[in-house]
Image (cartoon, rainbow, N blue to C red):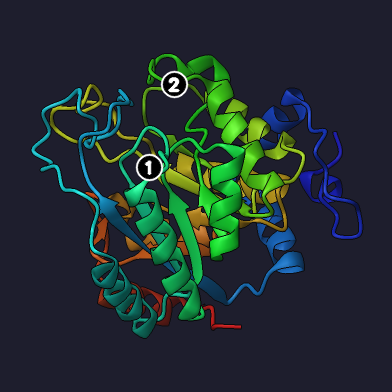
Amino acid sequence: MKSALTLSAPNQTLRHDWTRDEVRSIYHQPLLELVFQAQQVHRQHHNPQEVQCCRLLSIKTGGCPEDCGYCPQSAHYETGVERASLMDVDDVLARAREAKSEGSTRFCMGAAWREVRDGRDFDAVLEMVRGVSSLGMEVCCTLGMLTPEQAQRLAEAGLTAYNHNLDTSPEFYDSIITTRRYEDRLRTLQNVRRAGITVCCGGIIGMGESDDDRIGLLHQLASLDSHPESVPINMLVAVEGTPMANAQPADPLALVRCIATARLLMPASMVRLSAGRRSLTREAAALCFLAGANSIFTGEKLLTTPNPEVDEDEQLFRDLGLRPMAFE
């Protein structure tokens, strides 16, 4: 088999025709060889000393009608997450300015909705997008399913990116969610792309899926007509009250393996080390960066789950010789 490095050579057109067997062969390489190849490809497409810092804010919390088995915001489960209506626009913009002052170049806003509905709340979100964009930050939203018209309105407001994760492989998807189909997610991604908004799309490990499900997710992402510009790789944060409260934690080395494989399959994408960082040692986090992760969420909370403090990340960056990506 050709090496993954050869398959992802920088002078070659980015591939969207990976086979599941090719992805499987890359994923199952000896870990140190896989990380070595991923780091080489990473250096061909990105500055290895820079990491993009992003901030994620829950602008509407709890009460979601979806039954995603991992999510503490689902109305189907008793998790202790209190429902809160959509935040005030001025409050959101104040949080965006704070994030910018702490080095974040992208501000992400999440609402616990199944789908976007036209009306007062969506108009307020559009105002938030315009406000964050005026700060010179990249602005991302995750609001559930979108129609083509809603995607166009977000684009006109200045939205940089839209997050809509595939979560897992098509084969495992029905084991974690029954209220939405895989095809619904793919359709929203298509609507976002056609509106000219960049795509943020990844998944979660540690939900009881197999290695082949992780391979299936990565294959799906790398087979999209345009690779997602941002690929968040999350570790499940098990929350009491959800069906996955007692899930066996994923091995951090499996996270490293997923990140390295994502880097080889999608060389130009930002690969974001996302939820679950609280469970990683500093050494495991360092290995994730070596494997090709070049983006993180900063701040003490990701929507409703814990995240390392800003000063912890600053110390880790100093110790590893990394620096936050600067504003363009």
Question: Which is more foreground, mark 2 or mark 1?
Answer: 2
Residue 74 drawn above or below residue 86: above
Residue at image position (23%, 70%) is: 91
Task: Quickly name the residue at label 1.
Answer: 235
Image quadrant where one finds the N terminus: top right
Image quadrant where one finds the C terminus: bottom right
Q: Where is residue 277 in the image (x, y as percent from the top left)?
A: 33, 54
Q: Crowdedness of circle 1 by 10 Å Cα count: few (<14), some, many (20+)?
A: many
| Residue 108 placement, left or right of 19 | left
Q: Which of 81 and 267 is in front in this view?
A: 81
Q: Nearer the viewer, residue 272 or 24?
A: 272
Q: Which mark is residue 111?
A: none
Cα separation, mark 2 vs mark 1, equals 21 Å
Q: Which mark is residue 180?
A: 2
Asked which secondary structure carries label 1, the reply is strand
Q: Position of residue 62 (x, y in %)?
A: 20, 40
Q: Are marks 2 and 1 in contact (CB under 8 Å)?
A: no
